[in-house]
Image (cartoon, coloured by chain):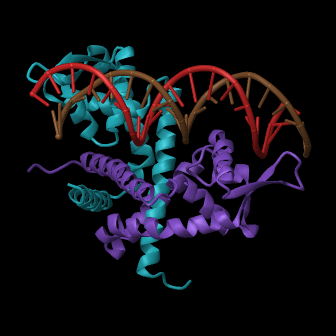
Chain colours: A cyan, B purple, C brown, D red
Amino acid sequence: MAKKTVEETKRSAWAAFVTAHAVLLERIETRLAQAKLPALAWYDVLWALERAPGRQVRLHELAAGVVLSRSNLSRLIDRLEDAGLTRREQAGEDGRGYYAVLTDEGAAMRRRMWPVYEAAIAELFDRHLERREADAMRAAFKRMLDAARAGDA
Amino acid sequence: MAKKTVEETKRSAWAAFVTAHAVLLERIETRLAQAKLPALAWYDVLWALERAPGRQVRLHELAAGVVLSRSNLSRLIDRLEDAGLTRREQAGEDGRGYYAVLTDEGAAMRRRMWPVYEAAIAELFDRHLERREADAMRAAFKRMLDAARAGDA
DNA sequence: TAAGATTGACGTCTCAATCTTA
DNA sequence: TAAGATTGAGACGTCAATCTTA
């Protein structure tokens, strides 16, 4: 087989990256659905709230926490609220703002989701990586993220 | 700083993987939109058709080409067809089936999209990878894909 | 005037039911 | 009965306009 150019090698890496993400995430969502649990988007919000001081985060800061779009936040929080997993609280120091606050039910839901999510990550992702590969991957993605985020300040 | 366990290292890699995908793809979609071009999902279909013999693929085989779900294929192809980029043709050998066929307009659209897509990949992804890192990444994702696909035959 | 958040309109995705042909 | 594809209903995402407070 002819040697690949550097460009071809990197295009292959990109294609593998995109495809792996699509397939792995679909598998994980399927497992959550089979266990009658909410989607990953909900997990991300619940986890962000659980880590935050007071289990509460301002709405616009939640949106900055990646994956989530600002335009969709109100409705996503609506759905979480309808399910009893979060509630809104007016921000005392800023009359315009609201906090999303994790409820006990929300914390319980996250604890039920984590084992399913964790097992899926371990099986689909971790198992196929040596430690140093995982480390190299983390570092590479961090470089990309830092650059992408610096690029549009 | 305390040493990370292997598990922590791999969790960090997973988090970086998911976050990088979200941020990079969003950046790319934004660039395409700014250039008044269709979304990446359309590119994937156009490119799959262009590589196929006769520039045509059976609908259910397109869906298997990753990212696309069978349930959404009909409507995605509807939109491409409305835009004049593909057309349907009855499969002669199987009265149930259809081919999606790439039109000349579809091929032209893909050619207009590629430079924007390629430049974005180069800038956001390639630039931050050494050649051997790209190669290691491709190999690792391929292992995950092979395992995930074998796991549900 | 701008920031934080919500809403309406619209487009897209998913599930389940359906239709047609094998 | 199953495979290929479409469709209706409802969930979800996005854009732009809007409302309220800073």
Residue B103 visible, this angle = yes
In the drawing, does residue B26 fall left or right of residue A52? right
In the rendered view, tell whether residue B37 sits above or below residue C17: below
Q: Nearer the viewer, residue A45 or A32?
A: A45
Q: How many marks?
A: 0
Q: Percent position (x, y) of residue B118?
A: 44, 69
Residue drawn at 49 percent across, 23 percent down: A36
Q: Percent position (x, y) of residue B51?
A: 65, 68
Q: Percent position (x, y) of residue A28?
A: 47, 38
Quadrant of residue A70 in the image? top left
Q: Nearer the viewer, residue A4 or D16?
A: D16
Quadrant of residue B69 in the image? top right
Residue drawn at 48 percent across, 63 percent down: A15
Q: Nearer the viewer, residue A23 or B68?
A: B68
Residue drawn at 34 percent across, 70 percent down: B133
Residue drawn at 40 percent across, 34 percent down: A40
Q: Nearer the viewer, residue A26 or B39?
A: B39
Residue B139 visible, this angle = no
Q: Percent position (x, y) of residue B78?
A: 68, 46
In the rendered view, tell whether residue B85 sits above or below residue A30: below
